[in-house]
Image: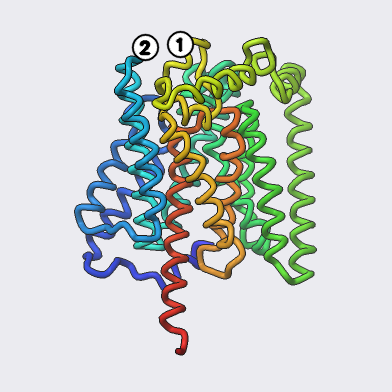
Amino acid sequence: MSAAVHSGTPAAAPGQGIALGRVGDVMLFLGVFSGSVVMFEPAPYDLILAAAGVFAFLVGLAIPRAIAPLVVLVLLFNIGGLLVLTQPMVEAERSRMFVAVSFFLAFTCVFFAATVAERPYRLNLIVTAMIGAAVVAALLGIAGYLGGIEALTRYDRAKGAFKDPNVFGPFLILPLLVLAREFMTRPVLAVWWKAAPIGILLLGVLFSFSRAAWFLALFGLVALGFVVFLVERRPSRRLRLILVAGLGALAIVMLLGVLLSDPQMREFFLNRAKLVQEYDGGRLGRLARHFIGFLWAAELPLGLGPLDFAHYFTEDPHNVYLKAFLGYGWLGGLAYPLLTVWTLAALFPLMFRARPWQPYAQCVFVALLGHVIIGWIIDSDHWRHFFLLWGLAWGMIALEAKEQARRRTAAPA
């Protein structure tokens, strides 16, 4: 997969020196790799990527026309957040910081898209750094859970160097899908060693005891296998894919059998595996709060405030679409789902076109779709890796636009 994206890609974009390009590569890699440590803010990820983004734009990184929808929609989304700040709020000071972080994440999203569009080889660089970060994060989470390390766990659930297990688990999904796709499409003897990082990531997801992460892993692996099966036309390859999928499923079941032989872990696992927890379906549980929140949103054009919902219900909305309306007003509430639909619709065809970035388009689309689905039960509007997914998606959309323009130019009259 890596070689495919590298082929035909210049070492540096026209008009920029190789030295500056390499400096940018190092900063970008370190920034993404540091995403495994976000226990405090600003995290190393924030500082390094802020510097990398400013550096890149100062030395000439351009925003291609193809990512204009992304730029406009994230800008409208955050302008909605600014408008919310014009009204009295309970958590005024924290809300201002919240909106500032939203602007920063939007900046990183645009930066990722622009840098991938300009230098396609950075798609490999970003994903490689994210795989490394995910393995480190998973190892920390596993060590924390098995070793009872309080700093690396929360509520007896692995969180690694994250603040919350519900962010730690989903962070591992894109790297898991990229590695799993290698097993689906390449000879086992060429990729056998990747079984170790896959196992580490699966253990990290399991020990997070996050229903969202479990869903993302299961949905992602099944959906990715289905996409690869559709794209592959040769019967022998399809048969091999079915065999690999069967062996992978068997290995996961055997691993679960071994781990759940411990009575305490089995009881905790079965309790967390319930589709509706007590705090979901109670009188003022999560689902009831969603209904009330949308009724409020219909009467509040400027929203309620990014953090004020918890003042009334002791918890955040745990629904990113409701959070968009309450935290960013009607403007943000409409911009967010429009961005979601537009991105998925534009990225979807790329999964089936023979391009160097096709493998990543498949993995990113599946991961992004999974995150969009779990957005109904969790607030993901400040997940750093979620904005990285948006950026990668639009970077590939821009690459496809360039390819289409090149083909139109090369076509005979």
413 or 110: nearer the viewer: 413
The answer to whether residue 166 is visible is no
Residue 361: % across, % down: 54, 57
- Taking depth in this image into account, of 34 and 273 the one nearest to the observer is 273
For the rendered model, the colour scheme is: rainbow
Residue 136: % across, % down: 48, 38
Whole-Å distance between the Cαs marked 1 and 2?
8 Å
Q: Which residue is mark 1?
A: 311
What's under tag 1, amino acid-wise? His
The earlier-in-sequence mark between 1 and 2 is 2
Residue ID for mark 2: 90
Instruction: Identify the residue at image location x=36%, y=36%.
Output: 78
User: Within 10 angstroms of label 1, few (less than 14), some, or many (20 or more) residues?
Assistant: few
Q: Quadrant for the C terminus, please.
A: bottom left
Along the line of sight, the residue nearer the viewer: 213 or 197? 213
- State the SS at label 1: helix
Task: Answer above or below: position of 238 versus 111.
Answer: below
Left of 275 or right of it: where is 83?
Answer: left
Asked if residue 412 shows in the view, the reply is: yes
Q: Residue at x 79, y 69 (%)?
A: 235
User: Type of residue at label 2?
Assistant: Val
Residue at 77% x, 50% y is 247
Q: Which mark is residue 249?
A: none
